[in-house]
Image (cartoon, helix red, strand yellow):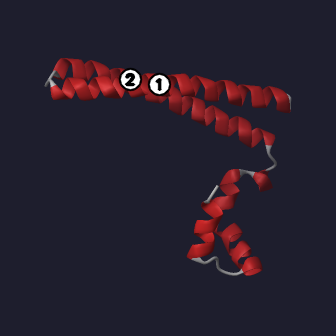
Amino acid sequence: MTPAMTVRCILAGMLGDVADYRRLRALLDAQFSAALRHRAEEISDIVGRIVELTAVLERRRRERVELAGACWPARCRPHAFRCKPYRSACRQRRGPVSMTAARRSRRW
């Protein structure tokens, strides 16, 4: 698979997720309404659909992680940035980051 095809697959999965998150929101609203009316059977039915939908979302997420991992070299993968050796190396190069600097960097 070419990198362009991989990116298209990732984007297609993301678009599918956007639609499914809308469905999930509607199901959660329906579940809340059913809970307010004490409709146990309706809640049970909605929970089953929520579980199915979240399984689809999770499957797509795993596919995206796998596709993205195949595109990037191992040294550049996002999960590598969360490991302790990387954080330690950053601290050694730049020194500790103050909370004020961390807050400033999060502003848009």
> Which label belongs to residue 22?
1
Q: Of 97 and 88, which appears nearest the observer?
A: 97
In the rendered structure, the answer to whether residue 43 lies left or right of residue 16 reads left
User: Quarter of the image holding residue 82?
Assistant: bottom right
**Image height check: is 38 above or below 72?**
above
**Image height check: is 102 above or below 45?**
below
Q: Of 22 and 50, which appears nearest the observer?
A: 22
Residue at x 42%, y 26% (from the top left corner): 24
> Which label belongs to residue 81?
none
Q: Tell me the SS state at disc 1.
A: helix
In the rendered structure, the answer to whether residue 24 lies left or right of residue 40 reads right
> Which label belongs to residue 26?
2
Q: Of 1 and 15, which appears nearest the observer?
A: 15
| Position in image of residue 39 (x %, y %) | 16, 21
| Position in image of residue 76 (x %, y %) | 78, 53
Q: Tell me the SS state at disc 2.
A: helix
In the rendered structure, the answer to whether residue 35 lies left or right of residue 103 reads left
Characterize the local packing of mark 1: few (<14), some (14-19) or many (20 or more) Cα atoms within 10 angstroms. Answer: few
- Residue type marked 2: Ala
